[in-house]
Image (tube, rainbow, N blue to C red):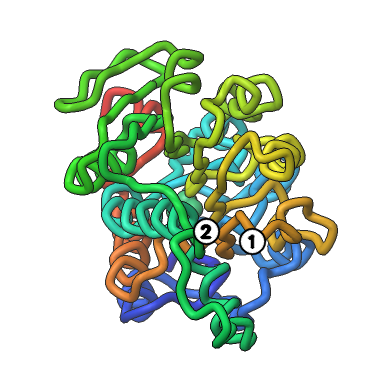
């Protein structure tokens, strides 16, 4: 029987289903498996089920000579050296589709929370700063409306399109930009710099690749419309956090909602941590019970297919299957 290493326990019955098809070795701790242990445990394995917290780099791929297939319980695969796998003919599975609505929901939640200053207002009430001498005032916690505002969507893939559908319901005008030309009904596609200049809200929904790393760098942030709100539920490396923090401190941008960071967990000196006009979350875009169960199920479907000698239903590098 082939052997698979799962770098985490998974929600639902996904792992018990997987165990019917292979000899399963599971990392039982909630802390990520240390790289050296991962390498060691993989020596005996044909398959790997990993999370986005596991770095699957070229050295690891080279060291794990038995490895034949990898499945990541994530849509993003920037933690994996895809070329190294492809060169060895190893398919990489991921979990697109099932997390689209949940991630788009979080994007809108962060847009609303940042625009309407909800965490700031929450702290104000909890900390007893709601003064009986000033119970309500026309200028108290004023924010920005979504209705009538222009939303620029960076990346018109499935999540970007789901954000567009939701934002249309809020009465927003929709602009978009995509790396490759793409038409989306109701979304006016613009050149990147035009999108930056026109958008009252900017939502980052593009995958992290060498092309998109630092896409929202210092120059791009400087081109954003004054008073705009930036929301990132994609990947940290896409947005320059220092430049974003400076724009927020200077009041050039109104607010930001950030679910993903260049370094996760954030380091205590992350410049965004001290800013009251930033809403922060710890990479929870896909974090609903139903979606996490679906992601686990799809990650296991990919492995079961590979164990049976079939192509993975969701494969990032299907070229490894040749003319199959
Ligand atoms: C989450 O960030 C994912 O890539 O699934």
Q: Can residue 72 be seen in this view?
A: no
The answer as to whether callout 1 falls within 8 Å of ligand 1 is no
Counting residues from the N terminus, which is met first, the one under dot 2 or under dot 1?
Answer: 1
Residue at the location (57% across, 68% down)? 120
Kindly report the distance in space between the C-alpha atoms of the residues bearing marks 2 and 1: 8 Å
Q: In this view, does 209 lie above or below 170?
A: above
Residue 155 at x, y percent in the picture: 39, 30
Label 2 C-beta lies within 8 Å of the nearest ligand 1 atom = no
Q: Quarter of the image for the N terminus: give it.
A: bottom left
Q: Are marks 2 and 1 in contact (CB under 8 Å)?
A: yes
Q: Is residue 195 left or right of residue 243?
A: left
* Image: 313 above or below 41: above
Identify the element where label 1 is drawn.
helix
Residue position for label 2: 48
Residue 263 image position (x, y, % from top left): 72, 52
Quarter of the image that includes the C terminus: top left
Foreground residue, 181 or 30?
Answer: 181
For label 1, the crowd category at 10 Å Cα-Cα, with few meaning under 14, some 14 to 19 and many 20 or more, is many
Give the image quarter of residue 297. Answer: bottom left
In the visual, does 170 lie left or right of 179?
Answer: left
Q: In this view, does 81 lie to the left or right of 170?
A: right
Q: Which of 122 and 161 is in front in this view?
A: 122
- On the image, the x and y values in percent for residue 63 come to 73, 47
Q: Nearer the viewer, residue 241 or 70?
A: 241
Q: Name the residue under label 1.
A: 42
Residue at 68 percent across and 69 percent down: it is: 33
Q: Look at the picture and state if 97 lies above or below 178.
A: below
Q: Is residue 260 left or right of residue 192?
A: right
> Which residue lies at the image location 59% right of the left edge and 61% below the top edge?
280
């Amino acid at each position: 029987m082939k052997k698979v290493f799962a770098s985490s326990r998974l929600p639902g019955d996904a792992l018990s289903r997987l165990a019917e098809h292979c000899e399963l070795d599971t990392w039982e701790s909630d802390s990520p498996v240390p790289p050296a242990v991962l390498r060691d445990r993989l020596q005996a394995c044909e398959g790997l089920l990993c999370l986005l917290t596991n770095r699957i780099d070229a050295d690891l791929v080279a060291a794990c000579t038995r490895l034949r297939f990898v499945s990541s319980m994530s849509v993003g695969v920037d933690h994996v050296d895809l070329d190294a796998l492809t060169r060895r003919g190893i398919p990489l599975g991921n979990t697109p589709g099932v997390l689209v609505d949940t991630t788009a929901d979080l994007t809108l939640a962060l847009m609303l929370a940042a625009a309407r200053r909800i965490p700031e207002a929450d702290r104000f009430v909890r900390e007893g700063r709601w003064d009986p001498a000033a119970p309500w005032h026309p200028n108290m916690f004023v924010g920005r409306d979504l209705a009538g505002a222009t939303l620029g969507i960076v990346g018109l893939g499935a999540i970007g399109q789901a954000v567009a559908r939701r934002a249309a319901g809020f009465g927003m005008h929709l602009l978009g930009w995509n790396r490759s030309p793409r038409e989306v009904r109701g979304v006016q596609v613009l050149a990147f710099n035009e999108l930056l200049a026109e958008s009252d809200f900017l939502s980052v929904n593009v995958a992290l690749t060498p092309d998109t790393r630092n896409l929202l760098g210092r120059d791009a942030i400087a081109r954003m419309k004054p008073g705009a709100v930036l929301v990132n539920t994609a990947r940290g490396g896409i947005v320059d956090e220092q430049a974003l923090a400076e724009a927020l401190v200077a009041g050039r941008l109104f607010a930001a909602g950030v679910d993903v960071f260049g370094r996760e967990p954030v380091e205590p000196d992350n410049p965004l941590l001290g800013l009251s006009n930033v809403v922060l979350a710890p990479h929870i875009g896909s974090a609903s019970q139903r979606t996490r169960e679906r992601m686990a199920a799809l990650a296991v479907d990919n492995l079961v297919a590979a164990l049976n000698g079939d192509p993975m239903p969701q494969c990032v590098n299907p070229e490894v299957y040749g003319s199959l």
